[in-house]
């Protein structure tokens, strides 16, 4: 009897880990499809705008999904603490899968006009709500099943789930891009979204085989479930201070480091440095594959030496390397751009009152002043520039070497006329930049994919060291009766808001300062705050009982 039970225990643990990871990977796949398809989505659903504005609006739509993740965390966290872990992450998975499938069926802007971006954003909201409940449920369910000395290793699979989801999204898009250009842009981009319905069916089948978490089942049997998860989590100081600590010491760094390493890095290589999309996707894909064993390594290490030192190492590595890494990435991806930046100074001469901070998290702001149009065009072109104040009322212009390009003012124009005016200016601006030696795209012959990969792996290592032990640490921080609610909120505020708003905030900082690397201060500052807070206040949680 005893031998039989011992023989079954590893298989049961394997099933729990595999099922939790597979379902979570599917949800990350759905959420991450946006990343390699951002440019195509911008053209399909924001076609009423010029290219730069459409891309900014698309980034805003991406951020909307992140903005709603904390709301999903509160909604599904309460359900998870009252009804159970299993039922909750089944519900979130179904909501995510159907929302993603529906994106693949959406008519474009050309067919239904403004309803297209509205429906697209609404589906991103549903995806954000679903993911807000998924991660916490899967992490808690998994770790509540495993022995105390294996929680770090189990925790690492939550990071791997994100890696599998991102890799799956990239592979699906690469497969779809094998279609001819016209077919891909007309309908082929929809295939990765539609494929999610098959993944949803498989994931539901796998998770239906699971039983409730033994920790929650014990709470339920003993009548100890929380009657008021919100009040206990956020209304009692002993629990609220742990929520705040989890957010400030861990999760704001998680959002900053992970999304800088994987998402902002990829956007920087493709959009700012004008790297070949296929090369960038391949580099990201290989780095993502590398992250799977790296997550496990750091999760295992946290079982040996503790969660805190491993996570501090990840934060510290990021702080030391983020700025040098992005500079090296420029030299590896587009050396001609690096040379032009050194040799041909670009300056925006504008009335400061005509310039605003171009932070647009929900894609509703209109770039119409001459200063903003000039700066957004240069930022989208990946060009660093200096700022020079002009007399009040002066229309902005861009000085490139010895040439001046007058900007345009579209404050009094409707959307269509403004888009046409900005398109004309951007065409003239790109021509002047080309004459000054700024390349329209990176030269594949000069690009070094190996150097790009090695640089990216530095940042990915930092992200894996922080993410690998993270789920175990968060689960160990909170009591079982409110764990789902209390854990999910700081996780999704950190990853959803700090991480999700990284692309739009970084773009705004770059446009304001003229420095293509200035956006890195955003993740750097959040990570520095977390590092100091964790160093001083975060307790070591390794081996804590899951009370």
Image (cartoon, grey):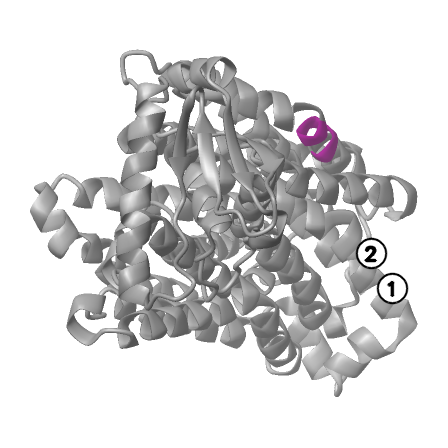
Residue 167: image location, x then y, percent? 37, 41
Residue designated by label 1: 241
Q: Which dot marks residue 245?
A: 2
The image quarter in which residue 478 lies: bottom right
- Residue 334 in picture, x, y percent from top left: 39, 19
Residue 206 visible in the shown view: yes
Q: Give the image quarter of residue 506.
A: top right
The residue lying toward the viewer, choosing from 370 and 444, is 370
**Residue at x 85% of width, y 69% of height:** 239
Discs 2, 1 touching: Cβ within 8 Å: yes
- Give the Cα separation between the discs numbered 2 and 1: 6 Å
Say which quadrant the C terminus sits in: bottom right
Q: Position of residue 296 (x, y in %)?
A: 57, 35
**Label 1, residues with CA under 10 Å away: few <14, some 14-19, many ≥20:** few
**In which quadrant of the rendered image does the N terminus lie?**
bottom right
Range shown magenta: 315-319
Residue sitting nearer the eye, 401 or 103: 401
Secondary element at image label 1: helix
Q: Is residue 100 magenta?
A: no
In depth, the one of 217 and 492 nearer the eye is: 492
Front residue of this view, candidates 264 and 220? 264
Is residue 311 positioned above or below 62 on the image?
A: above
Q: Is residue 410 above or below residue 503?
A: below
Residue 108 in view here: no
Q: Residues within 10 Å of mark 2 (few under 14, many from 20)?
A: many
- Inspect the magenta stretch and tell me whether residue 316 lies in it: yes
Residue at left 91%, top 68%? 238
Q: Is residue 142 above or below residue 214?
A: above
- Count of residue discs: 2
From the viewer's perspective, tell me whether residue 395 is left or right of residue 414.
Answer: right
């Amino acid at each position: 009897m005893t031998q039989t039970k011992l023989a079954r225990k590893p298989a049961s643990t394997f099933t729990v880990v595999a099922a939790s990871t597979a379902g979570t990977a599917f949800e990350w796949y759905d959420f991450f499809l946006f990343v390699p398809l951002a440019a195509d989505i911008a053209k399909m659903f924001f076609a009423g705008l010029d290219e730069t504005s459409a891309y900014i609006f698309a980034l805003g739509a991406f951020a909307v999904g992140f903005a709603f993740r904390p709301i999903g965390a509160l909604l599904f966290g309460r359900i998870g603490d009252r009804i159970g872990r299993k039922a909750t992450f089944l519900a979130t998975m179904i909501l995510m899968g159907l929302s993603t499938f529906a994106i693949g069926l959406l008519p474009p802007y050309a067919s239904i006009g403004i309803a297209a971006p509205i429906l697209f954003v609404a589906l991103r909201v549903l995806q954000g709500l679903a993911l807000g409940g998924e991660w916490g449920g899967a992490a808690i369910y998994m770790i509540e099943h495993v022995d105390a000395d294996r929680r770090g290793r189990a925790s690492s699979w939550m990071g791997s789930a994100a890696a599998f989801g991102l890799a799956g999204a990239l592979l699906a898009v690469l497969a779809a891009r094998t279609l001819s250009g016209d077919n891909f842009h007309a309908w082929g981009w929809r295939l990765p979204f539609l494929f999610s319905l098959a993944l949803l069916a498989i994931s539901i089948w796998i998770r239906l085989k699971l039983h409730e978490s033994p920790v929650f089942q014990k709470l339920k049997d003993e009548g100890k479930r929380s009657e008021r998860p919100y009040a206990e989590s956020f209304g009692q100081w002993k629990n609220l201070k742990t929520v705040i600590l989890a957010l400030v010491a861990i999760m704001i760094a998680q959002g900053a480091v992970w999304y800088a390493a994987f998402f902002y890095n990829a956007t920087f290589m493709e959009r700012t440095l004008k790297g070949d999309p296929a090369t960038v996707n391949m580099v990201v894909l290989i780095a993502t594959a590398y992250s799977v064993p790296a997550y496990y390594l750091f999760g295992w290490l946290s079982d040996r030496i503790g969660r805190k030192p491993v996570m501090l190492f990840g934060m510290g590595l990021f702080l030391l390397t983020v700025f040098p890494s992005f500079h090296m990435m420029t030299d590896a991806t587009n050396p001609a751009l690096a040379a032009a930046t050194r040799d041909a100074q670009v300056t925006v001469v504008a009335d400061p009152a005509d310039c605003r901070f171009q932070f647009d998290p929900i894609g509703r702001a209109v770039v119409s002043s001459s200063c903003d149009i000039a700066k957004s065009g240069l930022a989208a072109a990946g060009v660093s520039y200096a700022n020079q104040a002009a007399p009040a009322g002066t229309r902005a212009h861009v000085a490139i070497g010895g040439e001046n390009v007058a900007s345009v003012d579209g404050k009094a124009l409707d959307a269509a006329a403004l888009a046409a005016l900005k398109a004309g200016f951007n065409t003239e601006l790109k021509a002047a930049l080309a004459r000054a030696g700024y390349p329209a795209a990176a030269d594949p012959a000069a690009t070094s994919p190996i150097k790009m990969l090695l640089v990216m792996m530095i940042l990915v290592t930092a992200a894996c060291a922080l993410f690998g032990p993270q789920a175990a640490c968060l689960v160990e921080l909170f009591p079982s009766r409110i764990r789902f609610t209390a854990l999910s909120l700081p996780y999704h505020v950190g990853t959803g808001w700090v991480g999700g708003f990284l692309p739009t905030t970084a773009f705004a900082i770059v446009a304001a300062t003229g420095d293509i690397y200035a956006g890195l201060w955003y993740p750097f500052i959040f990570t520095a705050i977390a590092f100091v807070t964790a160093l001083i206040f975060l307790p070591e949680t390794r081996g804590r009982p899951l009370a």
